Amino acid sequence: MAGWLMPLEEVPDPVFAQRMLGDGVAIDPTEGCLYAPCDGEVTVLQPTGHAITLRAGDGVELLMHIGIDTVQLAGAGFDPQVKVGDQVRAGDVLIRFDLDSVVCGAPSVVTPVLLISQDGLTLTGKRGSGLVAPGEPIFTVERAGATAEAATDIVGETATRTVVVPLAHGIHARPAAKLREVLVPFAAKVTITKGEQSADARSPVRLMTLGIKLGDTIRITAEGGRADEAAATLAALIESGMGEKADPASATAPAPAPAPVAAPVSDEPGVLAGVTAAPGLAIGTARFFRLPELTIDPIGKGASLERARLEDGIAKVVRAIEADLSHAAGPMRSILSAHRAMLDDPELLEAARAAVLDGASAGQAWRQAIRPQAELLRQSGDAHLSERADDMVDLERRVVSAIEGVQDAPLVFPADTILLAEDMLPSQVTAIDPAQVCGFATVRGGPTSHVAILAASLGIPALVAMGSALRTVQEGETLILDAGAGTLRVAPNETQRSEAQARVDARMAALVAARAAAGAEARLADGTRIEVFANLGSVGDAERAVAAGAEGSGLLRTEFLFLDRETPPSVPEQTAEYQAIADALQGRPLIIRLLDIGGDKPAPYLPIAAEENPALGLRGIRVGLSHPQVLEDQLRAILGVRPIGVAKIMLPMIASVGELRAVRAVLDRLRGELGIGEKVELGIMVETPAAAATADLLAAEADFLSVGTNDLTQYTLAMDRGNPAVASGIDGLHPAVLRLIAYTCRGASTKGRWVGVCGGLASDPLAVPILVGLGVTELSATVSVVPEVKALLATLTLERARAHATAALACATAADVRRLAREFTA
Ligand code: PEP
Ligand code: MG
């Protein structure tokens, strides 16, 4: 193609820049036409027309990929002039494309031209930078014979080093990746041996299968070019501890890892013992749960096609997890964050991409990359690590399903089912309908697995690690699952059954009472009015919210309504969605938050250039202000909701009064244009310490303030809400966050404005009394907890809540606040 030639390293995508797909050059095109660089056969043409592979003689395969991330354009602007199987001559037109639309729609139009077959082939005579015209040579492909020099190199030097591993968690994925990095400048072949087993030091996945732990003695062997230096470098790096050095006492005498959970044994006939994963009592019918293994064709249909399928499958799962994350709270949130992080794991991604280059299909490549890691974790002998294998298995299935375009049939069971399974995956637990499944028990698993945490958060009693005895239960048998006692009684007699039934009934009665009373206005015991709203992401949520007794919605996450869109939603489309939700709320107030895109919430139709620090970059209202049409369209759509005023507007991520003023100016102009005289409330979210500190100034111009405790916690504590490494520290009950909420309430009250909470704290029973005591008068919670929040409020008085909040503000740590809160609600 005509354009500017540039070295591959300058391509703004590490996949190309680091030559993961092959060596070559890149061209920044000045015209929208790609010509055949040599004679050959078209072996792969992406259905979207943005990339093509040609096979020339002698095993030479060339990939030409027009632009970066252009797969997202879904073919728009590309017009292929050939099809797979065509024989072409050098200079024939392969693909015409609309340069302007690719420039506007993709992060870059730079086009890598790569040699993707590596079998003894090398590139020579690469042209450097500069203008290039079609037909000019840009490189030559040669079949290289092994040089005498290289051969001598390999036979030449051999060096070995023995090292005792000082890393607290041994050589897991990240250190393994670092080892490979330091070997980049060396030609030597380097292996690491533990006991009888060896692995290539450049393969993190294989290295992990050695299961190298703290205190293990390993041997490093380097052969060939600069062997001694390579072995010494690697040994020094490992001996340095790589930032994960165990303390000296444990390095010499490694603490034994907690053993995997062994199946407990029961002496009582008809009673199987298990380990409590989630407490509770259930009576139901045994039903076995088995998911068939997904069958995939292991052989790929060309590296570039399979690579695109792989990336696409991973991206789909990432999007699905991010969608769930945008409205998840508590343990669900940290588990989803961990899954999200695993999908970014460079070793995993690279292993899968390498498998694609080796000829595997996308699904097979992902499986091949992730399974050894899951297996390694399972066999680690460490209970916590082996429980993380569930997460790997889950991600294997989700990504393979996304690649293959298969969807597991929804999990439907008759009511009162007690599910029995070898193991459950986290995503399967979240797909369970608690109205059908009243408990589950698994042969394997552990009490701290994500499956256990999710079961607890869904309120489903569960037992794990029951061992093979569980397999002896017959399908259809009656079971009493007493998770608190760790027992599963098979075929109980009448007395045992009625005794258990009485206990189940008593527990249900309390919940039913909460649900029955949920229709009443939420008030404290002393009559103080507190509004209990629900957070929504769809019309379905709104219907469930009303049924659960929600008195309105304090947060509609609009970005969530249009998540899978490639193009921005139009004004009529938006109005229709908002109106449907307002209608489902049957006149109750609806607070519509403007699009909160950016940071942890990407939207395909509004791409934001890569940022070094996205949480501190273009997100929330900043996106709206930098895309005035998007902002105006959304405001117009909200003004279209009837009756006027039922839909209020809320601005995310406000950091200064100027942002509020800018939006109010647009809103006032639109109201004028549309002839709307009625008041349409405009409020702000308090999610930044800046907003909390200037609450009085903001309250002077905003109609209401609602605290987004998820982000306020992230920005106050400087801890990324999506980073599992700091997840344990992110607690909205941290005194710093509580003090900012107190400050917000004080500032708002000076201007007579109300303060609500729509972040995760509003759904946390330990936080609710403190928030009320601080002066919050509206709680917008997750739909499922609305009845409990209302029942809890009915037990409080404002006086008690205030005294409790004052004590919480004086606590030193989040743990102290939680302790105090537990004592308060006990
Ligand atoms: C929050 O930050 O607390 C909030 C409610 O917004 P989101 O979780 O959607 O960022
Ligand atoms: Mg937020």
Image: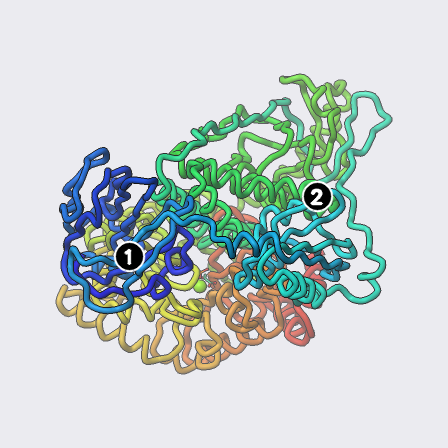
Q: Residues within 10 Å of mark 1 (few under 14, many from 20)?
A: some
Query: Of the residues shown, which amino acid type is indicated by label 1?
Result: Phe
Residue 725 horizontal/vertical position (percent):
60, 61
The answer to whether 452 appears left or right of 585 in the picture is right
Q: Which color scheme is applied?
A: rainbow
The relative height of residue 751 versus residue 404 in the rendered view (above or below) is below
For the N terminus, the image quarter is: bottom left
Please tell me whether mark 1 sits on a helix, a strand or a loop.
loop
Asked whether the viewer can see residue 777, the reply is: no
Which residue is identified by label 2? 197
Query: Of the residues shown, which amino acid type is indicated by label 2?
Result: Gln
Question: On the image, which quarter does residue 308 sit in?
Answer: top left
Residue 118 horizontal/vertical position (percent):
40, 47
Q: Which residue ends up furthest to the front in the rendered image?
A: 148
Q: In terms of depth relative to the viewer, which is nearer, 822 or 244?
A: 244
Which residue is identified by label 1? 139
Residue 808 horizontal/vertical position (percent):
66, 71
Q: In terms of depth relative to the viewer, which is nearer, 22 or 168?
A: 22
Point out the frontmost of discs 1 and 2.
Answer: 1
The residue at 26%/47% (across/down) is 51
The residue at 62%/56% (across/down) is 156
The residue at 52%/65% (across/down) is 720
Residue 494 horizontal/vertical position (percent):
75, 19
